[in-house]
Image (cartoon, helix red, strand yellow):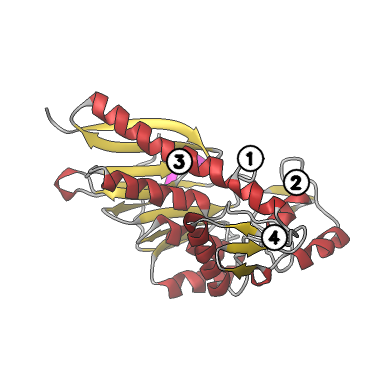
Amino acid sequence: MPLTLRRLSFQAMGSPCEIQIYEESRISAKKITQILSSEVSRLERKYSRFIPKSFLSEINYSAGNSMGIKIDKETRALFEHALSCFEQSNGQFDVTAGVLNNIWDFQNKIIPTDSQINELLPLIGFNKLQWRGSRLYMPPNMTIDFGGIVKEYAADSVARLARKIDVQYGLVNLGGDFAIIGPQPDNQPWPIGVADPKNRKALIAKIDAVEGGVASSGDYERCFVHQGKRYSHILNPKTGWPSAGLRAVSVAANLCTVAGSIATTAMIKEESEGIKWLEDSGLSYIAMNQSEEIIRNGWQKPSVTAE
């Protein structure tokens, strides 16, 4: 039987997701893709701040507890990555900024007051976390939010698991964050496109990738306009206010996790700083600035419009 492209579409982490693999047997492909989608579900159940019984919720409940909380190896690795993001961004990418979600309501377009923001800023700061061996000690009322990391981590985790069970050709797409299991047959690349923020049916760029990952960050889906001013859902942990830099960024890297942290950090920075950050990374990227101009490095212009 010839290798055939098989797809599994599902919802996870608040996003439409798809796993594509080449497999001879439809029954075998179904079993494999279900195993892989179960890995996404496992990570969502473990790290979603919206699930009261998730391990992340347990971590947040432990804030202020003198006994701290024991952290497993996988979660410790996520914290290590979060520390790297914090240090490389000079504190602008900070998973302890989750407490700001309590006062910013993008769905109902509610803007907090200066005093509300100033009250929460002392609760933010990755450097305030303390470790003793495998136990984490958090200051009272601090909140961890892995939202800027976990979807990209999940994509990489699924790709790793797929290779472990001998999948040779495949692509993971978790809400527009991609991890490549392996190239298409005959070492053909996967064409990955970036949607136009102003027209989701059109592409502004594409890249052909045979390995690594691609991640995107943008404010176009959850921003709102109030009295003529745009408010991005990407918050600056140092000020508590939305970032006012780039509108959208996509990055290709050796891992989806790396691409995601580079893209998100670029979004948090001021526009010119964000572009410099992307240039200094040495990675292929595409970005849209506040004037809706496209800046690209290593990404092609799409030859066709997506339907």
Q: Amino acid at mark 2?
A: Asp
Q: Which of the numbered marks, if any, corresponds to residue 105?
A: 2
Q: Secondary structure at mark 2?
A: loop
Q: Is residue 248 left or right of residue 124?
A: left
Q: CA distance from mark 2 to mark 1?
A: 23 Å
Residue at 49% from the left image edge and 47% from the top image edge: 196
- Which percent across, then down, holds residue 75? 52, 56
Sequence-earlier tag: 4 or 3: 3
Label 3 neighbour load within 10 Å: few <14, some 14-19, many 20+: many
Between 184 and 45, which is closer to the camera in this rendering?
A: 45
Mark 1 vs mark 3: give the one in front: 1
Q: Magenta stretch: give its range.
A: 199-203
The mark that comes first in sequence, 1 or 3, is: 3
Distance, label 1 to label 3, CA atoms, is 17 Å
Indicate which disc residue 53 carries.
1
Q: Amino acid at mark 1?
A: Lys
From the image, tell me which residue sits under label 3: 40
Q: Earlier in the sequence, mark 2 or mark 1?
A: 1
Judged by depth in the image, the label closer to the viewer, 3 or 2, is 3
Q: Quadrant of residue 48?
A: top right
Residue that label 4 marks? 67
The answer to whether the residue labelled 4 contacts the one labelled 3, judged by CB atoms less than 8 Å apart, is no
Label 4: state its secondary structure. loop
Label 3 vs label 2: CA separation?
A: 27 Å
Q: Earlier in the sequence, mark 4 or mark 1?
A: 1
